[in-house]
Amino acid sequence: MNVLFWVLGTGIFLVLVLVSIKTIALRQQKKILEKFKDKKILEMSAGANFFGQESSGMVQVRGNGALVLMEDSLYFKMWVPERDFSIPVKAMVTTEIVSSHLGKTKLQSLFKVVFTNQKGEKDSAAWLVANPHKWVEKVNNLKAR
């Protein structure tokens, strides 16, 4: 009886966590769409998993958030801890598909952007997104303009 209670309790907890994450993602997506209502959004993932920014070092929080590609920049808003940053398209050097970034992996392909940061140094950031090849293609098309 105790095992059944524990299994049911754990199942209910997991469902509540998943519903909460989905609710947060939808709320964040609405905020992002409102923030960029005057810009053309080319691609968006409300559930992108951030694998870190190279210049911040190996020890940093990996987190979920919204990744948005517009004609002039790539914008990321992490939910927890709350953080956001933008990479201008003109600062992007290359885009890549990689299997890990900063020693972190999920055994899935990641979308990686190599860019020149505000200090004029080479930097990079990577995300786990649905169809990372599409993100690479869209950024490359922007850079070819």
Image: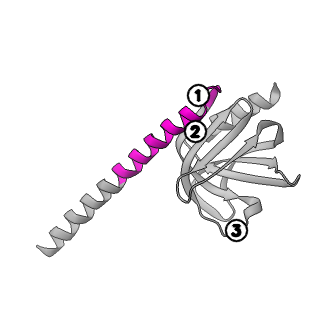
**Magenta span of residues:** 18-42
> Would you name the residue on which mark 2 appears?
131
Q: Earlier in the sequence, mark 3 or mark 1?
A: 1
- Residue at image position (76%, 29%) is 142
**92 is higher (above) or lower (below) than 12:** above
The label shown at residue 135 is none
Circle 2 or circle 1, nearest the eye: 1
- Residue at image position (58%, 35%) is 35
In the rendered image, residue 134 lying in the magenta stretch gets the answer no
Kindly identify the amino acid type of the residue bearing the numbered disc 3: Met
Q: Earlier in the sequence, mark 3 or mark 2?
A: 3
**Nearer-the-camera pick, 23 or 18:** 23
Q: Quadrant of residue 74?
A: top right
Kindly identify the amino acid type of the residue bearing the numbered disc 2: Asn
The label shown at residue 58 is 3
Disc 3 crowd rating (10 Å Cα; few below 14, some 14-19, many 20+) is: some
> Would you name the residue on which mark 1 appears?
37
Image quadrant holding the N terminus, namely bottom left
**70 is higher (above) or lower (below) than 48:** above
Disc 2 crowd rating (10 Å Cα; few below 14, some 14-19, many 20+) is: few
Instruction: From the viewer's perspective, tell me whether residue 127 is left or right of residue 19.
Output: right
- Residue at image position (28%, 61%) is 13
Q: CA distance from mark 3 to mark 1?
A: 35 Å
Image quadrant holding the C terminus, namely top right
Residue 33 location in percent, x, y? 54, 33
**59 is higher (above) or lower (below) than 144:** below
Q: Secondary structure at mark 2?
A: loop
